Image (tube, rainbow, N blue to C red):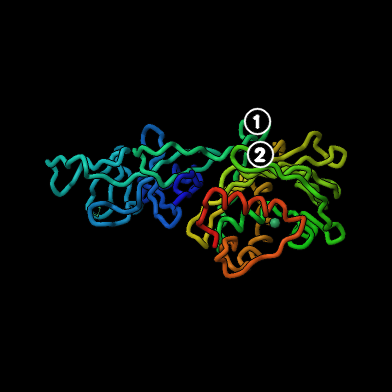
Amino acid sequence: MIEHHHYHPVLLASALDQARADGRRCPVQAHLLGTDLAIWRDDAGQVQAFDDRCPHRGASLSLGRIEGNRLECAYHGWQFEPGGRCTHVPAVPDWQPPEGHRARRYRAREAYGLVWVALLPADGAEAEPPLPDFAAEADDQLRKVNCGPYDVETSAPRIVENFLDMAHFGYVHEGWLGAREHTAIEPYRVTATEHGFIATECRAWQPQSSVQAATGALVDYTYEVNAPYTAILTKVPDAATVKVQGFRESIAMFVCPLSPECSRVWIRLAMLDWTSTDEHLQGFQHTIFMQDKPVLESQRPRLLPITPEAPVTELHCAADRASTAYRRYLKERGITFGIC
Ligand code: FES
Ligand code: CO
């Protein structure tokens, strides 16, 4: 599956350091593309992503704990090193298991406060996939805050499309991101980039464009897609209408495809606001996302209907240019998970 050749977010990185069972460090279970994972951090600080299935008798490794830099299975206590190799079998303590006694291990990295996994063999010959780019991450002037995860009963592409969509603001987010009196979407531009596309000159009228906004304003947006289930929004409101000069923000939405019709969403904020509490910034995103969620979960089919075999077709208008570009992007890359 082509999605296996991409990194996807599976956990907040902080969850790894907080996980304890009976006072012992333990792995955290995560899910990706129908696969269960047992994620843990080794003593060198590296994230380890094991298949959540002990190669001995198939118990969940995520039920185990971490003993001396090894993941110990909860069933018979077999211990697996960071590389996946089993080095201790308590029932036969003097036995050195052969090289092939291993837990299956996938590629794992840490970025943007999240753990990312690609379902490629950790030691396989496949090229290392790139992580989705989030340019604002490198800007030290911008404060980073993660929101979520939000579990949504729909496919990842439906969630990305909704993030790219301005025409729903006056309805779904009335009084927050839009108003019924200001629903027209001016023409905007979509341009292909090396890893996807960018939509520029997007303008939307917003009564409360951010937690800093004092009055309604036309907000300039740029939307970018540079990985199958990543979308980035950069907002540049008119400086005269906000209290904090130079205010801007970039928001990344990272969607984990748990299964074809079930997804987990994180939102990473990069903003100049260093005074609001994390909870306040997260609360605003939470409100917005909770407005989107019932609509997202109502869409049928849950898979994006874009292949000739899809059970239904959908109708388009000029304001859907970003959505159309996204559908083309998925098709061109042979993405099949989450579409029909
Ligand atoms: Fe894991 Fe036996 S099933 S040690
Ligand atoms: Co919305």
Quadrant of the image occupied by residue 292: bottom right
Residue 42 or residue 309, whichever sits in front: 309
Disc 1 versus disc 2: distance between alpha carbons?
9 Å
Q: Are marks 1 and 2 in contact (CB under 8 Å)?
A: yes
At label 2, the amino acid type is Ala
Which residue is located at x 47 percent, y 46 percent? 15
Query: Residue 288 in the image: x percent, y percent?
Result: 69, 56
Compare marks 1 and 2 and give the one earlier in the sequence.
1
Helix, strand or loop at mark 2: strand
Find residue 234 and name its label. Answer: none
Q: Is residue 319 left or right of residue 192?
A: right
Query: Residue 219 in the image: x percent, y percent?
Result: 80, 45
Find residue 270 and name its label. Answer: 2
Q: Quadrant of ligand 2?
A: bottom right
Q: Neighbour class for label 2 at 10 Å: few (<14), some, many (≥20)?
A: many
Residue 19's place in the image compared with 133, above or below, is below
Q: Neighbour class for label 1 at 10 Å: few (<14), some, many (≥20)?
A: few
Query: Residue 63 in the image: x percent, y percent?
Result: 34, 54
- In this figure, which residue is indicated by the disc labeled 1? 139
At label 1, the amino acid type is Asp
Which residue is located at x 39 percent, y 51 percent? 37
Q: Is residue 328 left or right of residue 42?
A: right
Residue 20 or residue 152, whichever sits in front: 152
